[in-house]
Amino acid sequence: MKLRDIAYAREGDKTDLANICLFPHDEADWPLLQEKITAEVVAAKFAPVIKGTVTRYELPNLQGLNFVLTAALAGGNSRSLRVDGTGKSYASLMLDIEI
Amino acid sequence: MIRIGCGSAFERDRIDWPVRLADSGAVDHMAFDCLAERSMALNQLRKLEDPNAGYMQRLEKPAAGFDVRLPKIVEGFAPFVASGGTMVGNFGAANPEGAGAAVVDGLRAAGVSGVKVGVITGDDVMEQVVKQDLYLPEYDRRISEMTEKIVSANAYIGAEPVVEALRQGATFVLGGRLADPSPYVGPICFRNGWELDDWEKVGLATLAGHLLECGTHVTGGNFTDPPFNPVPDMMELGFPYAEVDDGRIVVSKTPGTGGLVSTKTVRLQIGYEIGDPAAYLTPDVTADFSQVAVRQVGEDRVEVTGASGRERPETLKVLVGLDLGWKVTVEMSYGGPGCVERAQFSAELLRARVEKALGDEILEWHTDLVGMSSLFGTAISRGYPAEVRMRVAARTASKAAAQTIFDEGDYLPISGPAAGGGRGAMTLARAIGVTPALLDRSNVPLHVEVLES
C-alpha cells in the first residue's frame, strides 16, 4: 500500500531547505512508520528532485517524524525556476512511498 | 492568561476573516506576520524602482516599501483597536517609519485618536553586513565577492523591542523583519508577566506563535486530502487564536466559522518549517518542541503542553537579498497523440531561437512538462498522458533579454509545432535570491519610537 493510506504529511521551506513532517492517522501505525520510513528510504524517493541529504528527527509524544532535506528546492523559492518553488507538493511525494 | 489571535500569515493574506476574529470578542490581542523570505528584498527594490521603468508583474506603481495592505488593515481593524485591542506585526517591511506614519494617518481617518503606535527600527543591517564582509554559506562566497548583486540585508529581530513598545503604552506595534513568532512572543510574555530570559516560558510563547503564525494552516487549510482528513465547511475557515497560560496553550478558532482545530491539524503545524524539534532557533530562544503533547479538550479546542526552551542564540540570522536578474515563463498546452513529443519539441525550438539572439545573457534555463514531471521529476511516473503543458522558465541578466524570450513565446502558437493552445498568462518578473548569514546581535542596535494617533 501507499504511505498515504496510513499517514498524512506537510512540507515547509527555509531558503533551499525543505522539511516534511509525517504522522500516522492511527497511533497503532506509529511503530511501523518508525521502522520503515527511514532517512534512507526518503532520500531514495526524493533523489530525482533534491541534491542534498536527508536527516530524520522524531516527535515521540506526537507520534511524528520530521525529515529535513538539504539543497532541496533548486536554490529556494524566490529564485527557483520550478513550478512549485516552495515544494509544498513534496508532502504528496512522501505519501507516494510504498509501505 | 492572554488571548491572542492571528491577523495575517503572509504578505498578501486576506483581511476579512481575521477581522471577524478580532470583532468576535474571543481575543484581546492580534499578531500579524506579513513577510515571506523574499519580501524584504522585493520591498527594497520597490522603494528603488523607477516609476517609469515599465511593467513589473503585479506592480502597477512603486510602493512605499511597507505592507501594501496596511491602509486596509488599519481601516478593517480600527474598531478592534478603538475597543482597546492590541495589534503587533511586521507591517513595516523595508520602511517601518513610513508604515508608522501610515498607521497614525489611518487611525485618525477612522476617527480613532489617542492610540500609541510603536515603531521598531534597526533590522536593516546592510551597512554592518558589508562592513563585516559576512560569509554566505549557501554561495560559499563573502559579501565583497557579490557586492553588485546585494539589494537588502535584514536581521530577524525578536520580541525585546515589542515588549519595550508595549511597556511604553503602545497598543499598535510594528517593525520590519520581526521573526515570524515574535509578534506573538512579545505580548504573550508582557501580559503574562514573563521575563524574556525565562527560557522555558519564552519557548512556550514561541510555540504558541509558531502554531498561529500561518493562520488557517492550523484550522483546516492545507490539510484535507479526500477521502482523508475531511474538513467541515471550508467556505470560511476560522482564523486561529490561542489562550496562553503557565505551561499551557489552548488553540481554537473564530466562533461560528468553518474548518476545524484538531490534534491532527495542530500536529501538522507544530512540524511546519522546523528542523531539529529540540532546537528551533529564533532571536528570542532556542525552543524545544521535542516533548510536546496535544490533547483535544473541547470542540475545536486543542491543549498543547510540554514546550520548553534554552538560552537564545548569540547570533541573529540575517537574510541577504540578491538581485539575480529577471525571470520569465512561457506556457503552452498540447493534447492527444504525440502531445509529449510536440511539447518537448516546442520547448527545444523556443530555446534554440532565443539562444541565437541572446547567447550567454541566458543565465539559467528550465523546461517542465506539466502533467508529467514538473513537480517530482522522474520520482513518479504514470504512463502517457492525455495532455501536457509545456512550461519554460528562464533567468536572464537583463529585462530586455527576458522580454525577448517572452516575445518568442508569443510567436510560438503560429510558428511552432501543431495544435499548441492555451498560451495563457506568461510572466516576467525580477529574480530575487535570498540567502542566510549570521551576525552577532551586538551589531544590531534596535530603536523604539512611540507615536500617537
Image (spheres, coloured by chain):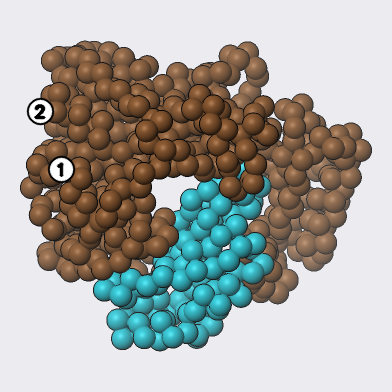
Looking at numbered disc 1 in the image, what kind of residue is underneath it? Glu
Q: Amino acid at mark 2?
A: Ser
Residue located beneath label 1 in the image: B195
Task: Return the residue nearer the eye: B104 or B117.
Answer: B117
Res. B147 image quadrant: top right
* Colour seen for chain B: brown
B241 relative position to B125: left or right:
left
Query: What is the tally of numbered marks visible in this picture?
Result: 2
Q: Nearer the viewer, residue B204 or B370?
A: B204
Residue of label 2: B83
Q: Which quadrant of the structure image shows residue B223? A: bottom left
Taking the spot 35% from the left edge, 82% from the top edge, the residue there is: A30
Task: State the SS at label 2.
Answer: loop
| Parent chain of label 2 | B
Shown colour of chain A = cyan
Q: Position of residue B252 (x, y in %)?
A: 18, 54
